[in-house]
Image (cartoon, helix red, strand yellow):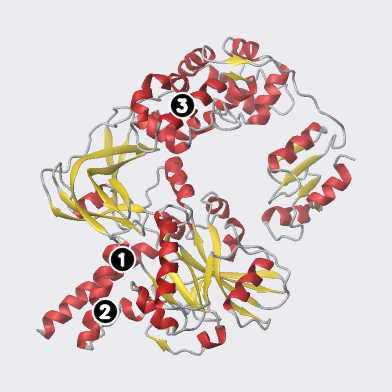
């Protein structure tokens, strides 16, 4: 009997550690949080019953992230929290003392240390005792100030997370295969290029002030202090009288926020901590957590049994992902009938079959519909041989992350689903300004076959009845989309030219071309000339941009598409824009970091150009000024400017010297 119990425990440990390796290493997950918690709880019960704790048991250690790079010992150990799924246990733990409730953010824990008002290091959680130094990535992560108005020693612990909206956008734009925002956040911090990390829009949200030299013994006052210093800490609520009823009521209110999608970031529960930090620090350490360090409340996921109707294959960028469509079930107060299956490997792991397959579904963390297990496989899991959007052949590829994840891809480089970023630019504010058609909406319309080229957007009226039947669409939203499309038919030539996504032709290039030639003359010239450098004489264009512009229009498919598009729109009368002054004449600027006086960097750039100046993207010997509100920053651009003897000025300095009087 003992041997059987030990073997079962060893098997549980292998499964849990393998899943943790994938989870913390940024690879594709091999089991859901629901499954991991169930196996963990089973192992813990067996350990408690037998008194046997085997080597490598995840109940006795903090899971270690697998990031490479220099290791750094934590000044204060980063221990994990004991967890419960019962509100009564939270009240018992509080023992009548004032506590704080906050989100248990589902990301990657990072510890930021400040000395003398400057960020001195940023370290991952690692195994709780030692982490990886990733200070070089700090400028690429939102929410980590490089400097603060406190000169003492300060240690802050927070979570690097990616919002659901940014996660969806990233997957749509890149076609990469990540199971959830937490997985993408972890994978992002294995990268060396800060600029690539910046594009993933990670945000660091402080959840506790670990150490300060100031006499602050209240957790609440410590969080308030973080806000005073410019941090944006986690949402929180104080429970002064933590009776079972008060605890349960407050947890219910926070749970309702998650259920109604009022939290933009992924969370996997709530954290309860004592307001009295001196009392909290006085507890013992048991296993891998401090008894008074805090308590994690995790929701009991409500599951439902249902029957698979069919697998829908959704094409985004280069990946074609399976989506389970099943008999509707009620979960967490909402009707659920669809759940992403991520990839082929996940379908095979679950044992997905054909129509009639019985399975259990949850809303993971109260939000994301998830198939957690198949109870009866019926029929066969069929993988499409042709893309559902363009009908070209598909191919199965095996990932190189070490997990051997199998994904389905379209082989057609010109598949409309791979052009999502171009369609997004077409409807953008700077483009045709079609409000109401988001990137996610475009993805749906493309997968339905309603949009294959830009002019198809102006023929969406042919699909009104079908559109109203889609989830999330109704009479009002469809009517608003059609009004916005109609409004965009009267536009400006520069908007249309920018919306075409011609390589190297951003807003500035389009403006310069149209300042030199009317649109009809531009098109007539570009389709008849053999001189790819024809427009290089225009200031700010040059041979490379001219060649790109001419080549694009010399492609038959592009030219025919523009001819169709011109039949759908009418242009407003507009005069070429001219510089409005001369305060920046002959000067070249580079802008970096956030701006405060102007709405954004584009508005500042437009002002400089209106005053005869020039704005470039990188610092060089021809740069006259680098504009950065953090003039003492150690960023690459600031370092380069100092090396070249180029003046680094703040926005206030710029306004004083070059702004309107």
Q: Position of residue 274 (x, y in %)?
A: 51, 80
- Residue at position x 60%, y 60% in the image: 143
Q: CA distance from mark 2 to mark 3?
A: 55 Å
Relative to 586, is 79 on the left or the right? left
The correct choice, above or below, for 389 with respect to 263 in the image is above
Q: What secondary structure is marked by label 2? A: helix
* Quarter of the figure that contains the C terminus: top right
Residue highlighted by disc 3: 479
Q: What secondary structure is marked by label 1? A: loop
Q: Position of residue 290 (x, y in %)?
A: 44, 84
Residue highlighted by disc 2: 44
Q: Nearer the viewer, mark 2 or mark 3?
A: 3
The correct choice, above or below, for 482 with respect to 240 in the image is above
**Label 1 neighbour load within 10 Å: few <14, some 14-19, many 20+:** some
- Residue at position x 67%, y 82% in the image: 213
* Image-quadrant location for residue 528: top right
* Image-quadrant location for residue 10: bottom left
Q: Residue lying furthest right in this view?
A: 661
* Residue placed most toward the observer, 630 or 163: 163
* Residue placed most toward the observer, 243 or 439: 243
Q: Position of residue 135 (x, y in %)?
A: 59, 66
Q: CA distance from mark 1 to mark 2?
A: 17 Å
Residue 268 in view in this figure: no
Relative to 12, is 161 on the left or the right? right
Mark sitting earlier along the chain (1/3): 1
* Residue placed most toward the observer, 1 or 134: 1
Residue highlighted by disc 1: 300
* Quarter of the figure that contains the N terminus: bottom left
Mark sitting earlier along the chain (1/2): 2
């Amino acid at each position: 009997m003992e041997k059987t119990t030990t073997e079962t425990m060893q098997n549980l440990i292998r499964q849990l550690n393998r899943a943790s390796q994938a989870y913390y290493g940024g690879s594709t997950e091999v089991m859901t949080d629901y499954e991991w918690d169930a196996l963990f709880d089973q192992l813990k019960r067996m350990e408690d019953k037998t008194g046997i704790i085997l080597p490598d048991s995840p109940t006795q250690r903090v899971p270690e992230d697998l990031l490479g790079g220099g290791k750094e010992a934590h000044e204060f150990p980063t221990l994990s929290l004991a967890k419960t799924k019962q509100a009564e246990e939270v009240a018992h733990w509080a023992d009548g003392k004032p506590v704080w409730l906050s989100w248990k953010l589902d990301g990657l824990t990072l510890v930021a240390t400040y000395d003398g008002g400057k960020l001195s290091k940023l370290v991952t959680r690692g195994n709780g005792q030692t982490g990886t130094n990733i200070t070089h990535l700090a400028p690429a992560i939102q929410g980590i100030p490089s400097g603060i108005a406190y000169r003492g020693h300060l240690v802050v612990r927070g979570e690097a997370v990616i919002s659901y909206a940014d996660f969806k956008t990233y997957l749509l734009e890149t076609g990469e295969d990540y199971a959830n925002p937490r997985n993408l956040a972890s994978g992002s911090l294995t990268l060396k290029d800060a600029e690539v990390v910046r594009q993933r829009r990670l945000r660091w949200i402080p959840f506790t002030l670990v150490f300060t030299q100031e006499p602050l013994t209240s957790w609440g006052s410590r969080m308030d202090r973080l806000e005073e210093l410019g941090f944006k800490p986690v949402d929180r609520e104080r429970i002064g009288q933590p009776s079972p009823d008060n605890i349960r009521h407050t947890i219910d209110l926070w749970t309702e926020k998650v259920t109604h999608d009022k939290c933009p970031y992924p969370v996997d529960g709530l954290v309860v901590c004592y307001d009295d930090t001196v009392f909290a620090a006085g507890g013992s350490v048991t296993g891998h957590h401090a008894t008074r360090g805090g308590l994690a409340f995790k929701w009991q996921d409500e599951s439902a049994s249902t029957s698979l109707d069919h697998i829908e294959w959704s094409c985004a960028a280069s990946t074609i992902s399976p989506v389970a469509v099943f008999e509707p079930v009620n979960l967490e107060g909402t009707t659920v009938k669809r759940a992403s299956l991520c990839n082929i490997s996940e379908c095979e792991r679950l044992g997905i079959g054909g129509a009639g397959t019985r399975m259990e579904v949850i809303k993971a963390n109260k939000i994301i519909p998830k198939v957690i297990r198949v109870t009866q496989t019926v029929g066969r899991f069929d993988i499409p041989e042709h893309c559902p959007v363009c009908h070209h052949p598909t191919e199965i590829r095996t990932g190189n992350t070490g997990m051997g994840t199998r994904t389905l891809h379209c082989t057609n480089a010109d598949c409309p689903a791979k052009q999502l970023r171009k369609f997004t630019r077409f409807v953008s504010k700077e483009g045709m300004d079609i409000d109401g058609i988001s990137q996610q909406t475009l993805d749906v319309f493309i997968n339905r076959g309603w949009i294959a080229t830009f002019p198809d957007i102006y023929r969406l009226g042919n699909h009104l009845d079908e559109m109203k039947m889609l989830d999330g669409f109704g009479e009002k939203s469809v009517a608003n989309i059609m009004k916005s499309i109609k409004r965009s038919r009267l536009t400006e030539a520069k908007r249309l030219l920018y919306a075409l996504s011609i390589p190297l032709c951003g807003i500035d290039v389009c403006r310069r071309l149209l300042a030199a030639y009317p649109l009809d003359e531009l098109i007539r010239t570009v389709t008849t000339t053999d001189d790819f450098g024809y427009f290089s004489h225009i200031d700010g264009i040059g041979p490379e941009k001219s060649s790109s512009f001419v080549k694009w229009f010399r492609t038959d498919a592009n030219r025919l598409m523009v001819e169709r598009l011109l039949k759908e729109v009418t242009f407003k009368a507009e005069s070429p824009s001219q510089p409005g002054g001369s305060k920046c004449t002959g000067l070249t600027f580079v802008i970096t970091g956030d701006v405060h006086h102007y709405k954004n960097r584009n508005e500042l750039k437009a002002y400089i150009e209106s005053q005869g100046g020039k704005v470039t993207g990188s610092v060089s010997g021809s740069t006259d000024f680098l504009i950065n509100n953090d003039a003492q920053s150690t960023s690459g651009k600031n370092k380069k400017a100092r090396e070249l003897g180029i003046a680094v000025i703040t926005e206030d300095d710029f306004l004083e010297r070059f702004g309107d009087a």
